[in-house]
Image (cartoon, rainbow, N blue to C red):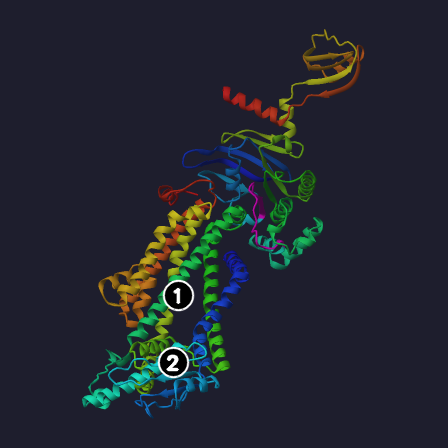
Amino acid sequence: MSKIWLIIQREYLTRVRKKSFIIMTLLTPILLAAFMVLPAWLVSMSDETETVMVLDESGLFADKLENKKDLTYIPLQGSLEQAKFVYQETDNTALLYIPKITVDNPEGITIYSKKNTSYQTQVRLENALEKEIENQRFMASGLDRETLERIEADISLATINLSDQGEKDNNVWVTSGAGIAGAFIIYFFIFLYGVQIMRGIIEEKTNRIVEVMISSVKPFQLMMGKIIGIAAVGLTQFLLWVILSTVVVTGVQSAFGVEAAPTPAQQLAAGRAAATGEDEETGEATKDSEGAEVVASAINAFNNLNLPLIIGCFLFYFLGGYLLYGSLFGAIGAAVDNETDTQQFMFPITIPLIISFIMSYSLVLKNPDGPVSFWMSIIPFTSPIVMMVRIPFGVPAWELLLSMALLIAGFVFTTWIAARIYRVGILMYGKKVNYKELSKWLFYRV
Amino acid sequence: MIILKIEDVTKTYANHTALDHVSFEIPAGCIFGLLGPNGAGKTSLIRIITQITGADSGEIYFKGERLKPDHIKDIGYLPEERGLYKKMKVGEQLLYLAQLKGLSKSEAKARIKAWIDRFEIRDWIDKNIEDLSKGMQQKVQFIATVLHEPSLIILDEPFSGFDPINANLIKDEILRLRDNGATIIFSTHRMESVEELCDNIALINRSRKVLDGPVQEIKDAYKTDTYQIIGNGQLMITSPDFQVLEQHDNHGTFRADVKLLNNTTPNDLLRYLIQRVEVHSFIELVPSINDIFIRKVKETHHV
């Protein structure tokens, strides 16, 4: 037992001290933070007041263009040439020229500016003009805007879970988000660290250290030490990412005073608010209040998730899935001489992983309690990913227990297979193996 | 005392027999040559002794006990294919391997210090293995093999990859270890390279043991009472007690291989020669292990 512990320590320490590990661990949260904070920061940077001079020859817009907090109109008189001259003397953003137009034919309105006008400014001006022209057209046809707003409908559904614990505020976006996030992290880590096991074993084989090692320790100890050591590296990296991301994001937020989107719930809420496509001018007030409502409901739903269960299951499926696939990756490493030979064996291992991830997105999310979702969350090779997606929606206890028991049985089985292939494979050089050969190894006496 | 007793060991792989009822004993405190051509089964036997694999049948006794996992820490093994973790520092690597053999950390550190001083490699301690030359790596690997002071040291083709200077250094270390009470097994197909070092040998050919015992006894058993004489004069041997196998004359000097017959002694031959020619050199023609091996293999094939 102390030997396996020494092996775990070595595998862990050599990896954690690697430059690539340190860089990846530090850089990822910084990139993540930059990704979340930068857009918000950039928007806030361009939040300067714009001043637009208006030369209105039609008289349609006299006193109709309201000043906003960051957009000021200055009416001008006289000819276009004079107006241009006046504008040239100022620092104002643009000169809006409205020729003699009618409500029915509003053509020929022009923006003059020293620099290129930003798209945002152009849209705001267009919106303002459109709204005023629409107003005037309403008046001409006997309707007013208030009547119209009363006719427009705007519906958003509140979803409530009726379960034994009573009614719970539920938000399908938050639930799916939590599930997919967990599933993706498991998928990602199985690949990233499974391949590391494989590489480590190939390295030991090509370095020919393996014979020295197994004259001191049992092949099984060497293999398990490596698998467990790398699992510890994965967990360390994951924990550091969580901690560092939190620190960096809160740090940046307080430093810049920027309202970033620190929780996925808020991000989703923002996305949803944007998706409703409010007209900026007319709906500014309503959007604010509705956005707040969405955020509140998302946070509420987030708080209503059974977080201890989700985190507990996440750790279980994370480790279970990793051990199941990790030992198979290890067996591949033992069976081949170099990384180019791994292709034919990698394929059948990656297929269930990729399928379960694709299915999670497409099918399981839509119907988390359907037969496909059920079976895929029970079978050990797909359950680590699929079950993570289902858990936030609520899974009956017996299904969860069955899936966990099968996953444990599954990795005991794959570890057994891997150990059998490993003990033969690590001393086998220069032989191209195929599946038939591998299956023979399972029953060799060594 | 017998340190290792191999009793009727057989090992079969999928389609060939690697060891076929092999038995012999290795006395403690000797240098033992495990000799045979490539593919004879030497490495298979070593892997069974080091418990990397198990025998299909037969037993191995280490210090009188049936071989068990606990014996691993009393055996040091230098495989033919050398290898270390390339990205690990020399010091850490030695520490790790010593700890895997059951040494405590402080004990291991003290011994590493002693060895790096003996080999004058203090500067390497913080270098990665991959930054060392091949010869340096071999030295580190040798230290790793003997660091836990095993009573049985198994060296598979120990001198391959060493330059003559380092090969001598290793040779001296091996003799020193033997004098300190360790038993050393040399496994090699280059029989002449270890002949002078070995006290005992076992010859293996085609998965069978063909011969084993103390080198001197084997040589005595296979000596042919033949002597090579070089000298001046006209050599004409007419005595029925001596048979000339081969003779070359060249401008008054000669070289002749002469076999003693009828229980005569080398002194009888010398006395006979001194009266007739001027003797410059008189050497017994001892068969090399290589010759004995070839003879033995031929014999067993004829049987």
Q: Position of residue A229 (x, y in %)?
A: 48, 60
**Tag 1–tag 2 contact (CB < 8 Å):** no
Closer-to-camera residue (A146/B203): A146
Q: Is residue A116 above or below residue B49?
A: below
Q: Residues within 10 Å of mark 2 (few under 14, many from 20)?
A: some
Q: Residue at x 55, y 38 (%)?
A: B5
Residue wearing tag 1: A185
Closer-to-camera residue (A224/B8): A224
Q: Position of residue B198 (x, y in %)?
A: 64, 34
Residue B141, numbered label: none
Q: Quadrant of the C terminus of chain A?
A: top left
Q: Does B240 lie within the magenta span?
A: no
Q: How many marks?
A: 2
Q: Is residue A335 above or below residue A95?
A: above
- Give the chain of mark 1: A
Q: Position of residue B51 (x, y in %)?
A: 50, 45
Q: Does B75 lie within the magenta span?
A: yes
Q: Is there any visible trace of residue B265 in the rendered image?
A: yes
Most prominent secondary structure in the magenta stretch?
loop
Which segment did they paint magenta?
B74-90
Q: Secondary structure at mark 2?
A: strand
- The amino acid on which the numbered mark 1 sits, given as a three-letter code, is Ile
Q: In the image, are marks 1 and 2 on the same chain?
A: yes
Residue wearing tag 2: A111
Q: Residues within 10 Å of mark 1 (few under 14, many from 20)?
A: some
- Give the chain of mark 2: A
Closer-to-camera residue (A63/A260): A63
Nearest to viewer (mark 1 / mark 2): 2
Q: Earlier in the sequence, mark 1 or mark 2?
A: 2
